[in-house]
Amino acid sequence: MTITSLQNNAIKNIVKLGKNRERQQQGLFIIEGARELSLALRADYNIDSVYVCREMFEKTKYPDVLNTLDRKNVFDISHEVFKKIAYRENSDGIVALAKPKQHLLSDLQLSANPFIIILESVEKPGNLGAILRTADAASIDAVVVCNPSTDLYNTNIIRSSVGGLFTVQTAVCTSEEAINWLNKNNITSYAAELKASDYYQDVDFTLPSAIVMGTEADGLTNMWLNNADKRIKIPMRGEIDSLNVSVSTAVFTFEAMRQRGFK
């Protein structure tokens, strides 16, 4: 049976999950897209239910994802219903509800020579999603989100990360916990600051390293500026004094990968 009513309780509930409070209360979040769902499955996320618009799903590049799901948890929906619950254009007609994971520092598994991205009080879901894409592209060890101002399972984060949330090790903690963890693991921290005296391309990222990024509006707090091992900046030749935080993070990250022989 195909769900065609916009007043269906399950459909109304999916719409509610667009809000952080509802995600926390229900212990569920939304995954849109077959690629994103396949990545979540590969990362062993527990899938609660799946809603498919067959006429749209016929065009997907990931048709096999349905074969890995329990059929009793898969529900057909009409095109109109899908438009009600979808968050992006040009979707391939599939939305899933999944259970979130804990993201603990203690669960991170580091390589022998780790590179970490640390974000303090990241505000915009799109920025965090873009940074997760960078982290995936560079195959870094982990992203650590300190004192977050946005829910890690915000639908816009999953959308803008193109599923990177499911491919990159991610931890959520306080800044103090992150500082102690870096010290414990002998990881050198580099705080991004506009007034820093050292340029990013002049520091050595070949040893265990972490770049620490603040908000676009205020930068890093004194806790990080006072506790980081070094402060670094990107040369600015124009009149605008800062880059988007996701762009800055990508600049630092790929300089580190260049130094490490990344090809």
Image: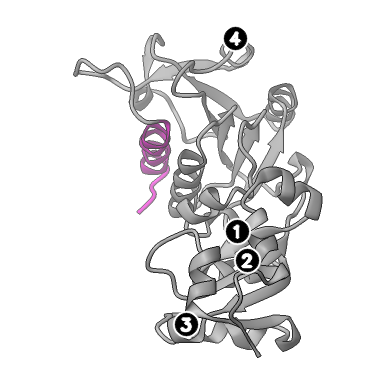
Assign the magenta stretch its main secondary structure.
helix
Cα separation, mark 4 vs mark 2, equals 36 Å
Give the extent of the magenta segment.
Answer: 245-263
Look at the numbered discs 3 and 1 and tell me whether their residues touch, using CB distance below 8 Å: no
Residue named by callout 3: 57
Q: Amino acid at mark 2?
A: Ala
Q: Which of label 3 and label 2 is nearer to you?
A: 3
First reached walking from the N terminus: tag 1 or tag 4: 1
Residue named by callout 4: 222
Cα separation, mark 3 vs mark 1, equals 22 Å
Residue 226 image-quadrant placement: top right
Q: Amino acid at mark 3?
A: Phe
Specify the label residue 166 is tagged with: 1
Cα separation, mark 1 vs mark 2, equals 5 Å
First reached walking from the N terminus: tag 1 or tag 2: 2
Look at the numbered discs 1 and 2 and tell me whether their residues touch, using CB distance below 8 Å: yes
